[in-house]
Amino acid sequence: MAANEPSPFESSEMLATFLISTPLLPESWRLCSQANASAANLRSFVVERVGAVVYVAFSGVQMAGGSDPSWRTLAPLDRIGGLPLFSSRRNKEAEEPVMVHAGMLTIFSSLFNSIQNQVLGILENTDTKSIVITGHSIGGATASLCTLWLLSYLQSISSSLSVMCITFGSPLLANKSFSQAISREWCGGNFCHVVSKHDIMPRLLFAPIAPLTPQLNFLLQFWHLSMTSPEFGKLAVQVSDQDKSDLFTAVLGCLETATQNEEASESILFYPFGNYFFVSDEGALCVDSPVTIIKMMHLLLSTSSPSCSIEDHLKYGEYVNKLSWQMLNQNNSMMMNIPNSSYEAGLELAIQSSGIANQESAVIAAKECLRSARRMGLSPVLNAASLPLSLSKVAPYRAQIEWYKRWCDEQDDEMGYYDTFKTRESSKREMRVNMYRLTLARFWNSVIDMIEKNELPHDFDQRAKWVNASQFYKLLVEPLDIAEYYGKEKHVKKGHYIEHGRERRYEIFDRWWKNREVTSGEENKERSKFASSTQDSCFWAKVEEARDWLNGMRSERDNNKLAILWEKIENFEKYAIGLIENKEVSNDVLAKNSSYSLWVGELKELKQLNANVQRFPQQFTRFMDGEVVP
């Protein structure tokens, strides 16, 4: 492929190749079948170790509100298993909150204690290298929620354990904001939803099926009985042809409207997330663009029939067993008549894998659908390769800010880097520094934007070069952002910086730094001199809050509120002393007329003035007693 030729197949082909070349799919389905069969014994999930991989499989024999007319009810989700999810603030003010299917969330919540005990037991075994969480039908939705909880838990303890979620015929789980949050948090690659080309279950929630609740209940009973005992299910429950037709027509009609009308697409209540692995008798097609997923769901279902759309939900075992052999056979046949363009070759392979190559009208629509998802510009790998050149173009601006910091530290007014910029006048020097600050912000925002559009490799945030570069930028420039915020008195209207003014890029870079691989030598390294940049990039924002607390001590008359303010002041005081003693601050913090040094002086005066007042402690830290002099 030419260097400048885009490829929409890069990430999806990598995932498809990985799945087909490993036992993950057949082992996952085997455990799903076992979980379905064991549901008759009231077992909702099974756990099994295969070498260093542990599988957790959820039964699809669950009810997620099928008997309730409000089967499509959504519930907010900002925490899972007691752990916070996603960013504290939404990407856009107008963006809806993250919401998931209420019934499926209820199922997960009812199982959570058992799930937590099993999974935490697995984590204690040092032989475990990977966890695969899987589920069929509604069990797939439970598996997705379990995966989300486990990823949040592992992040909270900085674990590098590998987690993969593989679902089979899972219904849609959540809204568009959930899908966007998954993409922003970079965990979309942890989810692979296997969907057969005719299965109606993954498509059901596109339609407002409340009027068809009786038909849906019959269908769920048929599927559930067939999962626990296939022969008994087929004999015991028969879904009428009319019921099948009603459900099929409703779902297909809503999918068609969503793919042809942009406004209708925006109003879809449930939205796909992660990777979708469409399987057929001819192979598999993997895509990760939500818009393309919806279009392919419609296109493939339109080649089906009401009966096939019901029966396909129970045929995943057949597809998985055939898949490896079919992909090898298909690759050999492709070699006999490969198009000149590798992009066209990938497109032809995708069409053959979807199982609609012999249906001319569907082929044309499918190619248009896949072309619409074509990445504009370079592939993620090539984007990552060219990004250092973009970084080198803004590096001089970073160097100019470093020079400005040194210049500030050398001035006779002894105010330091932060306060000099905060109280700056309209000099050419400060105007240039401000321009450099804004230019660097645009560069790093563009990097984050590329990440969120999947235009960079999935492991970009783990690459030491970029983790270190983002950390260096944050420590150097965020103090200027804080100085701008308080210098323009934005805190008066908006509130303090950390909660109300901090840019999301810094929160993302915090997470990159926290999750980096740390060597034992780095952990135990002690500083022999003060840092070039204060290691807490929000230090000055905390100083500004501490100044407010100190002012509150002078004016507040409520003893309870005074006690709270004093506790906050003491906590910050201890924190700042710890940074200083560990030499994790730069010289500007210790400058004679810095905001921090002035705050220390004001606190000493307040303590002296109130030395005989009982609400103040009589013993102060040794820093205030003069043993550590800034």
Image (cartoon, rainbow, N blue to C red):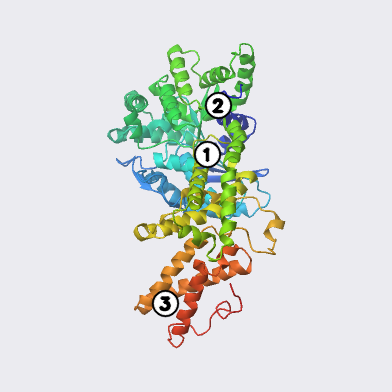
Disc 1 from disc 3: Cα separation: 45 Å
User: Can residue 511 be seen?
Assistant: yes
Give the farthest residue toward the left. 211
Type of residue at label 3? Ala
Q: Which residue in the structure is indicated by mark 1?
A: 451
Q: Mark 3 or mark 2, which is nearer to you?
A: 3
- Residue wearing tag 2: 9
The image quarter containing residue 64 is top left
Task: Pick whichever of labels 1 and 3 is earlier in the sequence.
Answer: 1
On screen, residue 181 versus residue 244, left or right, reads: right
Mark positioned earlier in the residue sequence (2 or 1): 2
Closest to the observer, 491 or 51 = 491
- Residue drawn 70% across and 61% down? 525
Crowd rating for badge 1 (residues with CA inside 10 Å; few <14, some 14–19, many 20+): many
Residues under numbered marks 1 and 3 in contact, where contact means CB atoms less than 8 Å apart:
no
Residue 413: image x %, image y %?
A: 53, 66
Circles 2 and 1, Cβ within 8 Å, touching? The answer is no
Question: Hey, what amino acid is under mark 2?
Answer: Phe
